[in-house]
Amino acid sequence: MSAQAMLTVLVTGASGGIGSAISRALAEKGHRVLLQGRNAERLQQLKAALPHSDRHQILVADLLNEAERLELVRSCEQLPGGLDALINNAGVSAFALLGETSDKELARLLHTNLLAPMALTRDLLPLLKRSQRAAIINISSAFGHIGHPGFGAYGASKAGLHGFTETLRRELLDTGIRVHYLAPRAVDTSLNSEAVNGLNHALGNKSDPPEKIAQQCLQLLHSKYGRRRFVGWPERFFIKINALFPALVDSALAKKLPLVRQFAGATDPLPEPGKS
Ligand SMILES: NC(=O)c1ccc[n+]([C@@H]2O[C@H](COP(=O)([O-])OP(=O)(O)OC[C@H]3O[C@@H](n4cnc5c(N)ncnc54)[C@H](OP(=O)(O)O)[C@@H]3O)[C@@H](O)[C@H]2O)c1
């Protein structure tokens, strides 16, 4: 790859399942990756295993901590070649009925998955505007488009990320920055607890390897226009059905509620027959 084609890309949550696959895919294509996460040891191991290991940089930061986020931004500002792309991938999930979700858990989900990427993107915009090839990719989830029982806070955070991405793409149409949105279905990573994997198995939901998401991400990075992409069939179809005929999806999910309650370990009593 020529030096001109090499991009400098910040990947948040690089130490996780999807983040490390994206980082590997970028490094294999000759790009320079800024590996962000909280776990320095895991980031070191990842960096050491990447092609052109010396080219990449580790940026340890908890994105929920404002001072650490601003330090991350300062580190990016000091890069001699600037920053070309930001991949907002860091995220957390939780599987619980709303009645069993604490304020602290609601705040953690919304802060990590929505507020932190919004704030980081805002802080990095001046730097990204200096790049001729700037791109932002927000990693969301199919659950941002199909409200699934047991994932209220997670789904709300990802639906919010969709609204943010759409707005930002339009807000930046008169700049060179392309804003992309990537919403996978279930992916084989440690984000999903045993209960979530058990539920997916019981419901016959399929999942993808993280490398598939990484390839989609790479395609978006080189796409000329801001794009919105959903991964997985039949989930892509259900997302369209849900947008047009949500009552159909209500009925389908109503049949799955007993399994959801079972795997979520719901402790409140089941509704009396005829009152649900
Ligand atoms: N796995 C799925 O089924 C699935 C499906 C659809 C969408 N997604 C989305 O894909 C993205 C990546 O998920 P994954 O499956 O790769 O999860 P993962 O393996 O658990 O990785 C999550 C990453 O996010 C980082 N992170 C979490 N909280 C952070 C914070 N406060 N500050 C900085 N970094 C933080 C973690 O860093 P540490 O290592 O330091 O904890 C880790 O690197 C998420 O946005 C997720 O919502 C996942």
Image: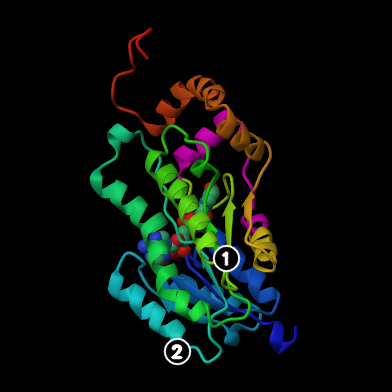
Residue 113 seen anywhere in this rendered image of the structure: yes
Q: Which residue is mark 2?
A: 78
Which amino acid type is shown beneath numbered disc 1? Leu
Q: Residue furthest bottom?
A: 80
Determine the secondary structure under disc 1: loop
- Residue farthest to the top, as pictured: 274
In magenta segment, residue 201: yes
Residue at position x 34%, y 10% in the image = 275
Q: Secondary structure at mark 2?
A: loop
Looking at the image, residue 149 lies above or below residue 189: above
Q: Quadrant of the C terminus?
A: top left
Task: Tell me the number on the disc at residue 136.
Answer: none
Q: Which residues are magenta?
A: 193-213
Whichever of labels 2 and 1 marks the residue nearer the N terminus, that label is 2
Instruction: Give the crowd class for mark 2: few <14, some 14-19, many >=20 residues within 10 Å.
Output: few
* Residue nearest the observer in this picture, 230 or 126: 126
